[in-house]
Every structure is written in structure tokens, then in C-alpha cells.
Amino acid sequence: MKKLFLASYAGIVIDKVLNILPKKPNELTLAFIPTARDPYKITATVDPEKEKLKSMGFSIKTVDLKNKSKEELRKDFKDIDVIFVAGGNTFYLLEKVIESGFFELIKELVEKGVVYIGSSAGSVLAGPDINITEGFDDRNEAPNLKTTDGLKLVDFIVLPHYGEGAYKEKTKKAYKQWKNSNYRIIPLTDKQAVIVIGDDYKVIEV
């Protein structure tokens, strides 16, 4: 049964993921995918979300998608229990997801019971389309991207950072543009997340 935890900013709400994990964090290995952050050229040596995951007890393996093949990734994800897809530029992320073969591989892994955790762009990626982020992510960072189709692990689209700080007006505009689309839009503040178990889901808040 598929299990997903889709957050606006996972660092704030990640404690709530304990409810869907098969074991305690200190018994699980988590693959941390930072790829979406590349366009922002983040140079900080300490990653707040990764540090939070470490403090919870997860054994963490960092896996970058760029310049990887599906075969290489399959080896990287061997014996992985949880996959965490960090935030950043959603278009760039999707480009690397497709180029690496992660697009197909993650679906196999989720079906086998690997827990998918998304933060911001990682949460948008899980839905049917990522183009809802065009108002705040630069598509020019993904010059080879030919589609905005997401992973379709869920049938709704997460709109992260809704009403938050610099994203306040941009996210409200995006929601207005997309609320009458063919997809259900779930706007999330940074204190909210969507927990998915099988075909059921619910929004939680801290």
C-alpha cells in the first residue's frame, strides 16, 4: 500500500510522518534527494531538513539525481525504506527526474512500500502536473524539459507555501488560476502536510 507524506516545508511538520512509518526512524534508511536545490546554489554546510531527519534517528544516504542512470539509481535505492525529495525549483527537478529514470523507478518503489516524503517542490512533483509553480519557479532552469506532467502518485496537486511570506500573493494568484482546473488543488501553509495511505488522504497541521 502506497504511503506518502507531502509537506509545504517538511522541516516544520516532519514529526507527523511517524504515524505512517513501518518502523521507528532509527530502524530505517532514508534516501535524501537535494537535486531541486541546484539552481539556488545553496552553499550552507548544514541543511536544516537533513539535520532534522538525523535528529529523528534516520540513517541517511544522500542521492543526487543529476547525471545518474536508472540502473545507478536502482543500486542507490537498494535497501532504502524512505525517500525524501527536497524542495527547490520544480521544473529543474522534473527535468532531472525524467533524465535519470527516477520518473519510472519511484513508482515501482512506492508500490513496493517505500515511503515517499516530499517537501515543497518534492510534494508538487508527486501530483499530476507541476505547472502550478510557474509563478514562482523559473522554468528557464530546465531548458530540456518537454512536459509538466508529474509523477501522478496522487491525483491532486499540492500548492506549497500558501499565504506564506514572499509567496503570499504568488500562491494566491496560482490558486485562483488553478482552482477550476481538472485537478483538485490542495493549498498548504508551511505548518501543514498531506498524509496519503493507499487511496485515502488527509491534511494535517501542527
Image: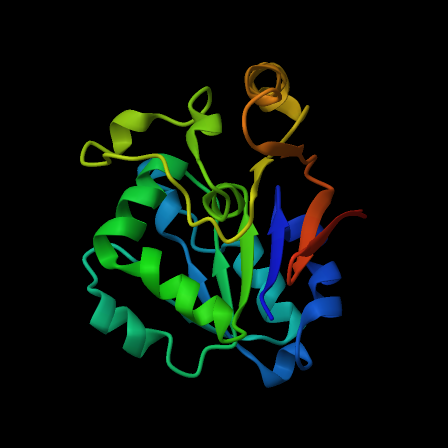
Rendering coords of residue 70 (x, y %) = 24, 66
Rendering coords of residue 62 (x, y %) = 39, 66
Answer left or right for 67 relative to 33. Answer: left
Which of the 4 quarters of the picture holds residue 130?
top left
**Residue at horizontal 69 percent and vertical 63 percent from the top:** 17
Rendering coords of residue 30 (x, y %) = 50, 72
Answer left or right for 140 relative to 40. Answer: left
Q: Which of 66 and 94 is in front in this view?
A: 94
**Residue at horizontal 24 percent and vertical 36 percent from the top:** 145
Find the residue positioned furthest to the front: 182
**Residue at horizontal 29 percent and vertical 35 percent from the top:** 147
Query: From this viewpoint, is residue 72 visible?
Result: yes
Q: State the quadrant of the N terminus.
A: bottom right
Q: Is residue 187 above or below residue 62?
A: above
Q: In this view, does 34 lie above or below 87?
A: below
Answer left or right for 9 relative to 70. Answer: right
Q: Which of 66 and 112 is in front in this view?
A: 112
**Residue at horizontal 47 percent and vertical 41 percent from the top:** 128
